Every structure is written in structure tokens, then in C-alpha cells.
Image (spheres, rainbow, N blue to C red):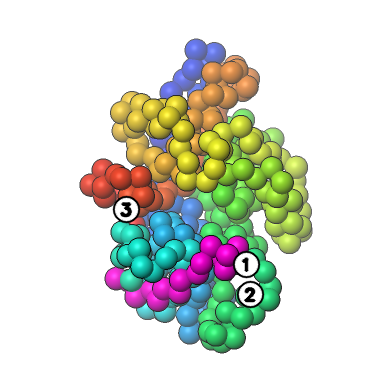
Amino acid sequence: MSLIEYLFTSSSGVGVDILRLDSLEGPASGNKWFKLVLNIEAAEHAAADCILSFGGAYSNHLHALAAVGFSKGFATIGCVRADPSSGLTPTLQDAKRWGMSLHYLSRSEYRRRHDQDFISELQAQYPSAYIVPEGGGNTLGAKGCAGIVDLIPNVGRDYAAIVLACGTGTTLVGIASKVAEGVSVIGVPVLKAEKFMASDIAAMFQSLKGDRGNWRLDHRFHGGAYAHLPEQMAQYMQEFELEYGVYLDPIYTAKAAYALQCMVDNNEFAAGSRVLLVHTGGLQGRRGFGLNQGDTPCLY
């Protein structure tokens, strides 16, 4: 069954479809499985006794890692940016129920999550752990995300552009590395990232031995900060869900959908072209915005 659904055609004839990665079956939906699959294989090959990674109290990545670990029978450790005295969020409740051990980090400690000395300290504390960066943002995560293109007919060549939200840029790298020639991959950063995201993406491409130059970042739609959804975006999210019957997550895909609508309205795509929006999942994160699980059609 195809995961691509038609959304609308603009007055200028731009056709917009959506790739529903949120509809994928399995322990982890959205782009999270693609980021994890090769990292899991590497952990198994290294005979690690657990996988350790990083995230916030509503992290889609940690939620997915815990779910996959539970389904495959291996241990997981979540290094969480949170105060343990604040209690467990619904996300962390799920993670603990799936057997994830929680290692709490203060905000200052969490800022060191990319620091090699800090990683070495964690590795010494958990010597048999395989460590995955925050969000699955490494070369193996990008290689895994190339598999998303297999879900797009004709390797995406029917589309002028593919639009998706970016947190680490890992999914963008995977898609851009495999999509057909002539397709532009447009990343919508969901946080203020002008100073680092492009260089991080370039470094990931270098590790994959090739930047095809078929991507760009559009920094107009971050909304001011990560996990901040301005009123006009929140209103659009509600209208989108009512119009198309597709639920969005407030942190990632809502911003990407809003950005794509603005691009279409501003005539930034050629008349008669087709554009694909990637729904990267993460619907469990809606709970961080006061939306109940019952408000989402699919939760992994």
C-alpha cells in the first residue's frame, strides 16, 4: 500500500502530495526507524549489551529507541534533559514501561552531549553501551534514512521538490543522497540553526562521500525556537488537520506543512509542478502540547 496521499492543487497548478511516514507499522513510526535501523545493526555487530542515546522529556527519538529495544529484547538507556523531581512525562512513562533506564542530565550537562570528553565519561560509566547521538544524527542514521526514498515512486523523479522538517538534518541527508537527479530537497529547520545546521549537514555528506548539491535550508519558519509554535502556525495546523484528516506533530511536521503552504502561496514553485511533503511522524510528542493520545490517529 502506498504511503503517499494527494493533498491539494493550487490555483497555479502546483500539486502537493504527502508521504505518510506516520502511518508506518512497527515499534517505531515516522523517520525514527530509518535513523535507528543501521545503528541497531552496528550495536549488535559490536556485541553491545545496550544502546544509549540523548533527548528531552518528550523526545520522539528516545520514545522510538525504547519501543524498538523492547520489541527486539535489548536494553536501552536514555540520557534525558530533565529534572527527576518533576515527575515522568507521558513519553518517559512509555519509555520506562518498555524497559528504558533513565539517566538524568542537567541543562549544563546536556549541552555537553556532543563533547567527546563527556561521551568518554559516559562510555566509562556504561562500558558495554553503544552510543547513538541525539536524534540518531550520525552517518548510519543518514544512510538508514536513504531508505525513505524507496517509498517514493520513481525515486522521486515525479516531483520538483521534497519538503521536510529538520532537527539535525539527518533525514534530509539520507533523502538527498538517493533521490532522483533534478529533485530539490528543501529542509525546514525547526530551530534557529543558521550558524550550524548547514555545516553539520555538509559534514554528514562528507562522511557519506558525496554532496550532490541538490538540497537547501529555508530558515524562515523555525517559529522563534525549538518546540515553539507561534499562533499563526498553530492555527494553520488546526486547519490542515480539519481539511485533510491528517494529524501533525507541533514540533516538526506542522512547521514544514506551514512552510510548504507559504512557498506555494508565494509562487515559489513552477506552475504545474508537483511537490512532496514528508510527514516524519512524532505524533506522540503532541502530548507535550496538551493534546491527549486519543487526539492522534497513530502512535508507536
- Specify whether residue 43 is in view: yes
Span colored in magenta: 97-111
Q: Is residue 67 left or right of residue 276?
A: left
The numbered mark, 2 or 3, whose residue comes first in the sequence reads 2
Q: Earlier in the sequence, mark 1 or mark 3?
A: 1
Q: Which residue is mark 2?
A: 118
Q: Residue 44's x, y, as percent?
A: 52, 80
Q: Residue at x 53, y 29 (%)?
A: 260
Residue under the point 45% across and 74% down:
103
Which numbered circle lies on residue 244? none
Give the numbered dot on residue 112. 1
Q: Residues within 10 Å of mark 1 (few under 14, many from 20)?
A: few
Q: Magenta segment: does it hold 109?
A: yes
Q: Secondary structure at mark 2?
A: helix
Q: Residue at x 68, y 76 (%)?
A: 117
Pointer 3: what residue?
Answer: 299
Q: Quadrant of the C terminus?
A: bottom left
Write the residue at 70% across / 50% down: 196
Mark 2 vs 1, N-terminal side: 1
